Image (cartoon, rainbow, N blue to C red):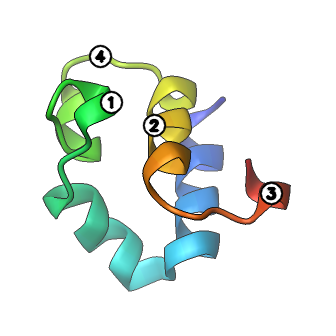
Amino acid sequence: MRLTEFWNRMSRHFGEAYAESWAKDYVIAGLGGRTVEQAFADGIAAKQIWQAVCQVVDVDPRLR
């Protein structure tokens, strides 16, 4: 998954402004206790991060 597709899905699910805020603040256990931003900074792939997001929020199946 490309980074642009990841952020497109985040924006479609959370809304553009909230997606960025959520990515900064929400700690995901499935990412080793990291936020989305920390996971990207640590080199985790967008697809793996998106899968972790989908495990903690009820994402529309069309976006999974």
Foreground residue, 57 or 25?
57
Residue 43: mark: 4
Amino acid at dot 2:
Ala
Residue 40 seen from this side: no
Question: Does 58 sit left or right of 38 as displayed?
Answer: right
Q: Nearer the viewer, residue 57 or 44?
A: 57
Looking at this view, name the residue that lies furthest to the right: 62
- Residue identifier under label 2: 52
**Residue displayed at 33% across by 30% down:** 30
| Distance between mark 1 and mark 3 Cα atoms | 19 Å
Provide the residue designation for mark 1: 30
Q: Earlier in the sequence, mark 1 or mark 3?
A: 1
Residue 46 in the image: x percent, y percent?
50, 30
Mark positioned earlier in the residue sequence (1 or 2)? 1
* Quadrant that contains the N terminus: top right
What's the distance in space between the residues labelled 3 and 2, CA to CA?
14 Å
Label located before the other in sequence (3 or 4): 4
Along the polypeptide, which appears first: circle 2 or circle 4?
Answer: 4
Q: Nearer the viewer, mark 1 or mark 4?
A: 1
Crowding near the residue tagged with mark 4, few <14, some 14–19, many ≥20 C-alpha atoms within 10 Å? few
